[in-house]
Amino acid sequence: MHDDIPTVTLLSGLSIPALGIGTWNMGERPGDASQDIASIRKAIELGMAVVDTAETYADGGSEEIVGTAIKSVRGDVFLVSKVHPANASAQGTIKACERSLRRLGTDHLDLYLLHWRGSYPLEETVDAFEKLKADGKIRDWGVSNFDVDDMEDLFSIPGGKNCAANQVLYNLSRRGPEYDLLPWCQSHGVPIMAYSPIEQGRILSNHELIRIAKAYQATPAQIALAFLLERDGVMPIPKSSNPDRVTENRGASELEISDEDWTALDAEFPPPNSKVPLEMI
Ligand code: NDP
């Protein structure tokens, strides 16, 4: 692992990079495959070795792109995929995982997430996750889009406390989780994977973000990612199909932002002062 990249520690004690790469939309257009693959490889080479995908992305196409990208470097990658809630029954979860493994060309996932809470009882999905773990098909499991009440439900069922991560929408313009979900996860040892960490590019034209970025000879995306990296147990997973942007995003971990500029960011993107129900994209 690259020594200078921040890490998060999982319940198992394993430390993994606090910066990864997302792959939503990859695999949708066959003509883009080489750029997608080059970007994922660049991320791994730079130590952003958490690669996030899901069975739903491009109907499995994203997992296939990831499979090609990681073929010769599987051992360097912390591989994450997700089961669609409609598949998250006792048997369905296992079959979905096996399909993902085939598309990814690997014999195990490092982390398998329930994409969002659906109609199958959590007990069923957790039992299936634990079975996949016992069979060596996944190393760990977690959830996504779970708010505090969902996490409390999860922790109240047998095995629920084995949850290794919660992947949620969290960025400068969506600070709701800071009110209760982030502290809850931090106090229960559950890392947050911050998805859409640059709000899919929409926050990058913010004038204050641009002003602060200029002061550090940085880019708005780097400041937005540095904001997340500053927080304990938070791992942003920006998606880019452009290797130069991946390199740019990696640079976020080298920034040291002054207290004065954090205060300026708080003024522009105020933290919540009451409960904000968890948002989803
Ligand atoms: P992001 O906030 O990561 O933004 C991605 C967009 O920003 C892309 O259009 C990308 O374009 C562009 N971009 C990336 N880096 C830069 C940069 N340095 N400067 C300018 N533009 C940039 O959004 P995502 O929604 O993709 O979230 C990240 C990942 O999180 C997903 O890919 C997915 O893996 C996961 N996710 C999970 C969800 C869940 O429900 N669990 C929901 C949504 C996302 P380009 O590729 O052209 O560089």
Image (cartoon, rainbow, N blue to C red):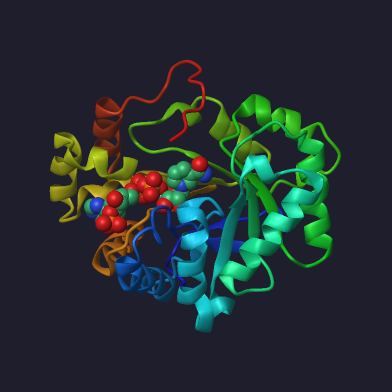
User: In percent of the image, x 68 and y 59: which residue is there?
Assistant: 97
Q: As displayed, is residue 245 above or below residue 279?
A: below
Report the label total. 0
**In the rendered view, does 167 fall on the left or right side of 19?**
right
User: In percent of the image, x 33 and y 74: which residue is there?
Assistant: 34
**In the rendered view, does 41 fall on the left or right side of 1?**
left
Q: Is residue 280 in sight in this rendering?
A: yes
Locate residue 269, reporting x and y percent.
Answer: 30, 28
Q: Is residue 256 in sight in this rendering?
A: no
Residue farthest toward the right in the current orientation of the protein: 158
**Quadrant position of the C terminus in the picture:** top left
State the residue in front, 184 or 85.
Answer: 85
Quarter where residue 254 is shown: bottom left
Residue farthest toward the top in the current orientation of the protein: 274
Locate residue 231, reporting x and y percent.
Answer: 46, 44
**In the rendered view, does 145 fall on the left or right side of 205?**
right
User: In percent of the image, x 60 and y 34: which residue is there?
Assistant: 146
Q: As displayed, is residue 35 above or below residue 150?
A: below
Locate residue 223, reporting x and y percent.
Answer: 27, 47
Locate residue 204, reporting x and y percent.
Answer: 21, 43
**In the rendered view, does 176 fall on the left or right side of 126?**
left
State the residue in front, 119 or 264.
Answer: 119
